[in-house]
Amino acid sequence: MNKILMLVYAICGIIAIGVFYSMNLLTQPVNNDDYWGGNGNPALFIPVVAMPFILYFLYGTTELSMRANERWLLRKGTIGGILISTTYILAASFFTYNKAFEFRKYIVDVKGASSYPEEFALFNVFSTHIFLNPLTFILVVMVCFLTGAVWSLARNRKEKVQIL
């Protein structure tokens, strides 16, 4: 990638991190007395405006992963990276899901307006701090790395098939 694209990629990465951080700060509190964030829905304006930057960051991470795998890693290294990133993706997803499920029970206990946790969605205005944090940001980056690594293996396979 040339220097201009890398600069744009870095700027988009900073904006994507900022969106995750700001969405985390604007979580609506469950208790009305512990107000420390926004009311949830207006905070959705931030990722809508920043979506082109976030998408470019995701594409750039995938492209960078693919090129780095092709250039610096052998096939075994790429497969090892795929295994590591898959392990992280599964572990972080499981951890986030369990945390959101427990938080949903907490919402029912505190709010009292509902008696069943299933009435609340896992991702709601109260739980953005669970889904938009550094753990899930790294999860998104790992999904991009996984996609780039698989893409790299597929491209190398096509080149080898054409040579034969």
Image (cartoon, rainbow, N blue to C red):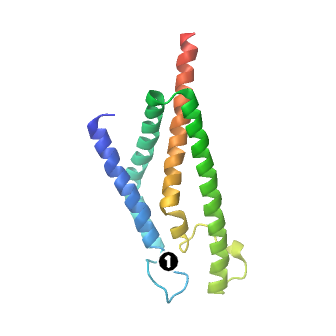
Quadrant (top left/top right/bottom left/bottom right) for the C terminus: top right
Q: Farthest residue in the left direction?
A: 4
Residue displayed at 57% across by 22% down: 157
Closer to us: 104 or 133: 133
Residue displayed at 30% across by 45% down: 8
What crowding class fits label 1: few (fewer than 14 Cα within 10 Å), some (14-19), or many (20 or more)?
A: many
Residue 70 image position (x, y, % from top left): 47, 28
Q: Quadrant of residue 76?
A: top right
Q: Is residue 55 toward the left or the right of residue 127 in the image? A: left
Above or below residue 90? Residue 66 is: above
Residue 97 image position (x, y, % from top left): 64, 63
Closer to us: 85 or 123: 85
Residue 115 image position (x, y, % from top left): 72, 82
Residue displayed at 54% across by 64% down: 131
Above or below residue 76? Residue 36 is: below
Q: Is residue 159 toward the left or the right of residue 68 in the image? A: right
Quadrant (top left/top right/bottom left/bottom right) for the N terminus: top left
Q: Is residue 101 visible?
A: yes
Q: Secondary structure at mark 1?
A: loop
User: The disc labelled 1 sits on which kind of residue?
Assistant: Gln
Q: Farthest residue in the bottom direction?
A: 33
Above or below residue 155? Residue 25 is: below
Residue 99 image position (x, y, % from top left): 62, 68
Q: Which residue is mark 1?
A: 28
Q: Quadrant of residue 119?
A: bottom right
Q: Is residue 45 visible?
A: no
Residue displayed at 40% across by 61% down: 19
Q: How many marks?
A: 1
Q: Farthest residue in the right direction?
A: 116
Closer to us: 40 or 76: 76
